Image (cartoon, rainbow, N blue to C red):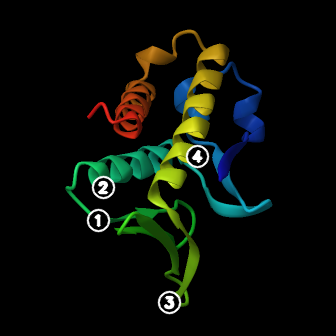
Amino acid sequence: MRMRFEIEPDEELAQLPFRVSTYFEYRMNMFVLQNGVEKEFCTSTFHAAILVGIAKGLIEIYDDEKSKFTVEMYESTLEYTFTYFQKLLTITRYEGYNGETIEMMKCRFDDFVEAFVKEYERYHKAILKQDCHAFENKHYCMMRDQINILKNHMSGVI
């Protein structure tokens, strides 16, 4: 399993000098490559909140604080619920507009976390290449901390 984050820059904001806080407002498309097929997983503006929310939920699962968490998308009525049970992660999408619930995917928890962390870290490093002052942004620092915590969980350090 692999993940890919694709950021769609806002045309007006993209003409301004790069700022981390502005970049976090752009629309993000998240794709999952599973069994050789790439599928769109989710799309949202204010993507930093989405990434931080997913990482926070995964950490809480590792810490046995929760077995289920929900992340709401911005500019839509979509909600994604992540449910952990017996080493499997089931992700369902709920459409608030028409009440439809669709199972997006089911996979091994460890596979999802590994794919997410790898892309989250790549994304995080790419921001620093564009703005050497990125660490002045509290959300950027929070992301770094989440990546480190998840990597430590994956390696069995904590």
Q: Amino acid at mark 4?
A: Ala
In the rendered image, the quadrant that contains the C terminus is: top left
Mark 2, residues whose alpha carbon is within 10 Å: few (<14), some, or many (≥20)?
Answer: some
**Residue at 61% in and 32% down:** 123
Q: Secondary structure at mark 3?
A: loop
User: Gap in Å between the C-alphas at discs 4 and 1?
Assistant: 19 Å
100 relative to 28, above or below: below
User: Gap in Å between the C-alphas at discs 1 and 3?
Assistant: 23 Å
Q: Earlier in the sequence, mark 1 or mark 3?
A: 1
Q: Label for residue 122? A: none
Q: Earlier in the sequence, mark 2 or mark 3?
A: 2
Left or right of 36? Residue 145 is left
Whether label 4 touches label 2, CB < 8 Å = no
Q: Amino acid at mark 2?
A: Ile
Q: Which residue is mark 3?
A: 99
Q: Which residue is mark 2?
A: 61
- Residue 65 placed where, x, y %? 20, 56
Q: Earlier in the sequence, mark 4 or mark 1?
A: 1
Q: Secondary structure at mark 2?
A: helix
User: Gap in Å between the C-alphas at discs 4 and 2?
Assistant: 16 Å
Q: Label for residue 115? A: 4
Whether label 1 touches label 3, CB < 8 Å = no
Residue furthest left in the image: 65
Q: Earlier in the sequence, mark 3 or mark 4?
A: 3
Q: Earlier in the sequence, mark 2 or mark 1?
A: 2
User: Gap in Å between the C-alphas at discs 3 and 4?
Assistant: 30 Å
Q: Is residue 80 visible?
A: no
Q: Nearer the viewer, residue 72 or 121?
A: 121
